[in-house]
Image (spheres, rainbow, N blue to C red):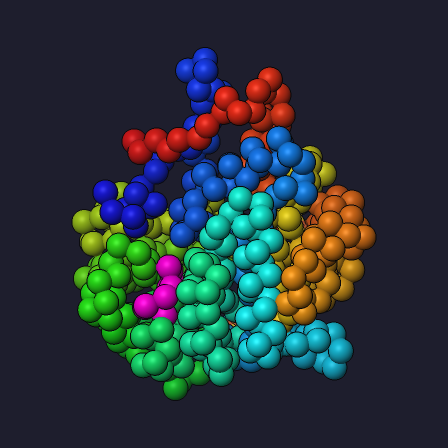
Amino acid sequence: MDNINSSLSPKKIIAVNMVEGKVIWMSDRIYPQHFYPLSIKDYCYAIKSAVKKGLKALPILSISSKDYPYCDFSCEDCLACPSRNWAIKAGHIKYPVIPLDKYKNMLKEISRYSKERGVDRVRFEFCGEGNPDLYEHRAEIIRYAAQECNMGVVYVSTGSHLTDDLCYTLVKNASFIRISFPGITTEAYAHYSGQSRFGYNDALNLLKKLVALRQQMKRENGLLLGVRTCLRKDNDGHYKDFIKTIGELGVDCFQGVKVLLYHNKESQYEKISPQTIRELNEIKEEYAQYGLKHFVVPNDLSSIHINRALRDTNKPLKCWSSKISPALYGSNLICCVLWDRIINSEFHYGIMEGESGELESMMHGERAEFIAQHCPSCCEECCSFADNQFIDELWKVLKLQDDIDEIDFFFEYC
Ligand code: SF4
Ligand code: SF4
């Protein structure tokens, strides 16, 4: 099995006591697209190490970086507007667009911090709050992250400004390119993206180009190509055609997500139609015959709006994701990407300058203690609920083991 197939196909993860030959825990919450090029197994080993050596031994496994708060699209329900208006106001975010040398030093520091905690390859996601294609040093920072810091580069964009040079750099260096489609027909794309310069067919042509380049550079075994869309009304009835189209183009995976909304918007009560639920469930069974390697939509398809509410009854012990997968907004290191955490600097670990050793003081200093004390207890919503719940469960199981060194983790593929 090649690297991509073996990453996308596990069905379960199990923890085994190797001395007793006994399975002590299992979970089917694998989420391969969410973790790629890492996997849930990397998270399990990080937690095992923290059980043995303490929480300060936790590496940063993944960072999503919001480094360009300007966009050429005007999407319906874009969540970035309030936070990016806040960010670009003088002083709120020191470097909303990070100078290249500083950015390089920051990446070096992140990879050093994690390497000293046993992780050689940090997943580094360049993503939203704007169009990452437009950052003038994008090609150089991607190359640097992959080649000088051994990072697993994940690139999430509409791709509307991917130049030939940037496409080449991405295909050569990235582990995962995920192109976002505001809509999956010509009309839906134009409607939801709020602009007309770059349309549905342009996005399909871009995918074609990326697939061809990947073949030319013989990167089929290392570069995952995916597509993501929101499950919005105008997409209804078009999912099968779309999946066939991208499957024929050579795209590997599809992710359908619910629309994220701020509280109190009336549309949060909108339902997904029974026909659409049927169509999506049928594709779940059939996607391989259309040429895709992975297809994922939320398990709960009852409403269009995602419910991220955290109730006292379902709060995890700790906010693990703030330690293992914090976010960068410009050079500010933040506990997560929830918009009300972004605009409240109490939840920022600090401002990275790219100096060696600064992450120890940020991740284990006073601000980190404040975050650990207040999250998740004061969080009303959570953007990493599934990750936190998974790690919480594993943490409790591993803490009960007499000898943690006897525990190992394996994937099950059927
Ligand atoms: S592409 Fe992303 S950042 Fe830009 S408007 Fe759309 S949702 Fe917002
Ligand atoms: S919302 Fe709170 S609990 Fe969830 S990831 Fe953010 S800080 Fe952690």
Residue 269 is inside the magenta segment: no
**In this picture, which residue range is highlighted in magenta?**
170-178
Compared with 205, 27 (above or below) is above
Q: Residue at 51% of width from left, 37% of height from top? A: 45
- Asked whether 281 or 168 is in front, the reply is 168
- Asked whether 360 or 275 is in front, the reply is 360
Q: Is residue 389 left or right of residue 236?
A: right
Q: Is residue 235 left or right of residue 346?
A: left
Q: Residue at 34% of width from left, 38% of height from top? A: 10
Image coordinates for residue 130, horizontal then vertical, percent: 53, 75
Q: In this view, does 5 lie to the left or right of 261?
A: left
- Asked whether 167 or 231 is in front, the reply is 167
Image coordinates for residue 308, horizontal then vertical, percent: 60, 50
Q: Residue at 43% of width from left, 48% of height from top? A: 38
Q: Could you tell me which quadrant the N terminus lies in?
A: top left
- Asked whether 350 or 343 is in front, the reply is 350
Compared with 341, 277 (above or below) is above
Compared with 233, 302 (above or below) is above
Image coordinates for residue 346, horizontal then vertical, percent: 78, 60
- Most extreme residue toward the top is 20
Image coordinates for residue 390, horizontal then vertical, percent: 55, 37
Asked whether residue 214 appears in the rendered view, the answer is yes
When asked about the image quadrant of residue 354, the answer is bottom right
Q: Residue at 57% of width from left, 72% of height from top? A: 103
Q: Could you tell me which quadrant the C terminus lies in?
A: top left
Instruction: Count the marks.
Output: 0
- Most extreme residue toward the bottom is 197
Asked whether residue 274 appears in the rendered view, the answer is no
When asked about the image quadrant of residue 202, the answer is bottom left
